[in-house]
Image (cartoon, rainbow, N blue to C red):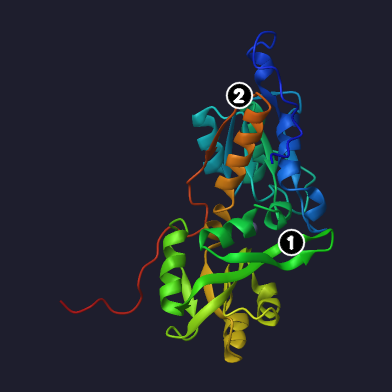
């Protein structure tokens, strides 16, 4: 069933083509339905960052980060709105002057008539959100939240589920590499590569804080990003879950196509015109990975 705050409109007759467009406020409502703000962490920032609620929206660009390259793409595509996962100002600001990169983003968006909205930990936790999409992308069965939300235990941070068949860690890692979008650092794998694994925990983005939770939950592998040397090394000294460390962008990007699809479906259900595009610009900070050590002798 489609849960949509949009009321279906009569398809014939009275509605003009302008009336069939969504507004920024409609998109805010659709994203709130997909990623309810009560699921967000208390320290987080989610919602409309810039834009006029009454402005029309015919086309939306979805991306992980609200950075200059994504604004460039939105302008090139003629998008009316950008939806990002990360907020522009997580800790607030007292100025938006175009003297720094974030201020320039605000200025360029307003000049170009482009609204910006973000859904961060609300989308991490939601049904069909980032964690659920990451679990689905690697084929987990029976995935449930790794850390259920106090507001709704059926949703929450991370997911844990099972592979259809027990698999060697190295083969599972190959499947993860194939499932994630390409990013120069790729993935790193820690643990016994020939061990058999079946129960998998995932959390898109920085997952250090969930290492103990993944162990308590009985995971054989924890797939996340941004793992640091000491937490990862000390964790592996005690054994499972083995670790697969992707990049922040890649492990979160997988949640954007389902959100785009959900918005498009809800718009269509409400008889509105909307095109969505998921940016494929990799906004990880890393542009190149090189093998280290002396070059092989030829
Ligand atoms: Zn993130």
- The N terminus lies in quadrant: top right
Say which quarter of the image contains residue 124: bottom right
At mark 2, the secondary structure is loop
Locate ligand 1 by image quadrant: bottom right
Residue at 70% in and 34% down: 27
Q: Earlier in the sequence, mark 1 or mark 2?
A: 1
Residue lying at the far bottom in this picture: please name it.
237
Residue at 42% in and 85% down: 194
Instruction: State the image coordinates of residue 276 (x, y, percent, origin top left).
Output: 56, 35
Would you call the spot at circle 1 few (<14 residues within 10 Å), some (14-19), or many (20 or more)? Answer: many
User: Is residue 265 something one can see in this rendering?
Assistant: yes
Distance Cα–Cα, label 1 vs label 2: 32 Å
- The C terminus lies in quadrant: bottom left
Would you call the spot at circle 2 few (<14 residues within 10 Å), some (14-19), or many (20 or more)? Answer: some
Q: Is residue 123 above or below residue 171?
A: above
In the picture of the structure, the residue carrying the numbered disc 2 is 273
| Front position in the image: 108 or 232 | 232
Instruction: State the image coordinates of residue 28 (x, y, percent, origin top left).
Output: 74, 36
In the picture of the structure, the residue carrying the numbered disc 1 is 156
Say which quarter of the image contains residue 259: top right
Left or right of 223? Residue 145 is right
Instruction: State the image coordinates of residue 202 (x, y, percent, origin top left).
Output: 60, 68
Residue at 77% in and 34% down: 5
| Front position in the image: 285 or 81 | 81
Say which quarter of the image contains residue 84: top right
Instruction: State the image coordinates of residue 99 (x, y, percent, origin top left).
Output: 65, 41
User: Is residue 225 something one can see in this rendering?
Assistant: no
């Amino acid at each position: 069933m489609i849960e949509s705050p949009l009321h279906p409109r009569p398809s014939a007759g009275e509605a003009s083509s302008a009336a069939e467009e969504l507004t920024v406020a409609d998109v805010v409502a659709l994203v709130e339905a997909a990623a309810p703000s009560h699921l967000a962490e208390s320290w987080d920032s989610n919602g409309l960052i810039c834009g006029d609620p009454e402005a029309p929206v015919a086309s939306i660009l979805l991306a992980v980060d609200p950075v200059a390259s994504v604004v460039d793409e939105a302008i090139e595509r003629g998008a009316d709105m950008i939806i990002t996962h990360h907020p522009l100002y997580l800790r607030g600001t007292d100025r938006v002057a175009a003297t720094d990169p974030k201020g320039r983003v605000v200025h360029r968006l307003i000049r170009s008539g482009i609204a910006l909205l973000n859904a961060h930990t609300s989308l991490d936790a939601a049904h069909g959100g980032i964690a659920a999409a990451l679990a689905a992308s690697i084929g987990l069965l029976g995935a449930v939240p790794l850390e259920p939300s106090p507001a709704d235990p059926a949703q929450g941070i991370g997911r844990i589920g099972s592979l259809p068949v027990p698999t060697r860690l190295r083969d599972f890692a190959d499947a993860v590499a194939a499932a994630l979008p390409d990013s120069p650092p790729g993935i790193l794998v820690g643990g016994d590569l020939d061990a058999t694994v079946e129960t998998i925990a995932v959390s898109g983005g920085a997952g250090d804080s969930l290492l103990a939770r993944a162990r308590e939950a009985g995971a054989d592998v924890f797939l996340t990003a941004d793992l640091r040397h000491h937490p990862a090394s000390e964790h592996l000294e005690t054994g499972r879950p083995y670790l697969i460390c992707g990049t922040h962008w890649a492990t979160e990007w997988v949640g954007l196509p389902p959100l785009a699809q959900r918005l498009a479906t809800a718009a269509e259900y409400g008889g509105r015109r909307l095109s969505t595009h998921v940016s494929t610009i990799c906004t990880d900070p890393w542009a190149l990975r090189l093998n280290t050590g002396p070059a092989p002798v030829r």
